[in-house]
Amino acid sequence: MTIIIGKRTFALPWYKLLLVAMLPVIVVAFAACPGDQTNASQQNASTASQKWGNSPNINNYYEYLQLKQIYEARDNPQLVLNAYLYSEQTGQLTCLGKVKGFGVPYGTSWSQPQNGANGSVPEPNGLYPSSSTNADWIQLIDPVTGKTSIAFVEPNLIITSQTLPCKPMSA
């Protein structure tokens, strides 16, 4: 088949011509699919909202209160808790000892991170916690002298006010 565009003449086999002719139809078909899916999702959300209401009926804001109480407890410099290490190999807890406070995640800083996160907002305690580390700094309390020492602890640390059943650390 021969196609003439302006002063130029192009000889194309019939299957290439069919491909060129079908291209706009294929593009329109693919462009319409996501829109239909989005419209269907929006319609489903609208139907659910009409059936169940626009937002949850929250009156007590108990989780807000819990978080406030947790921040206030973390701010207590006299808070003494128990620390345990969990072993994935044995499935048991090992008593680490008494600790002062909950500890501080390793990457926490008091200045805004310089990793491009200019929109970072500090937590209510004024600190910027790390979202990429699992280790903590803790203040272990010596059971004999009562003095604290700083320790760096990797994952599987549990700090609680409860006394949990555990194996003592070997000396």
Image (tube, rainbow, N blue to C red):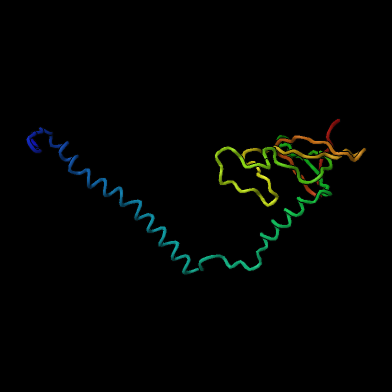
Q: In this view of the protein, which residue sits in the foreground, 116 or 133?
A: 116
Q: Is residue 13 left or right of residue 133?
A: left
Residue 64, picture quadrant: bottom right
Q: How many marks?
A: 0
Percent across and percent down for residue 56 are 56, 65
Quarter in which the N terminus is drawn? top left
Residue lying furthest right? 144
Q: Residue at x 13, y 34 (%)?
A: 13
Return the residue nearer the eye: 32 or 72: 72
Horizontal placement of 115 versus 111: left or right? left
Of 113 and 105, nearer the camera is: 113
Give the percent coordinates (x, y) of residue 16.
17, 36
Q: Give 59 or 13, whichever is nearer the viewer.
A: 59
Vertical arrangement, residue 64 with respect to residue 2, above or below: below
Residue at left offset 80%, top offset 36%? 150
The image shows residue 11 at horizontal and vertical percentages of 10, 32
Residue 65 picture location, percent across and down: 70, 61
Residue 138 image-quadrant placement: top right
157 lies above or below 35: above
Q: Residue at x 26, y 46 (%)?
A: 27
Q: Is residue 127 above or below residue 38?
A: above
Q: For the point 65% across and 41% down, which residue is it?
A: 111
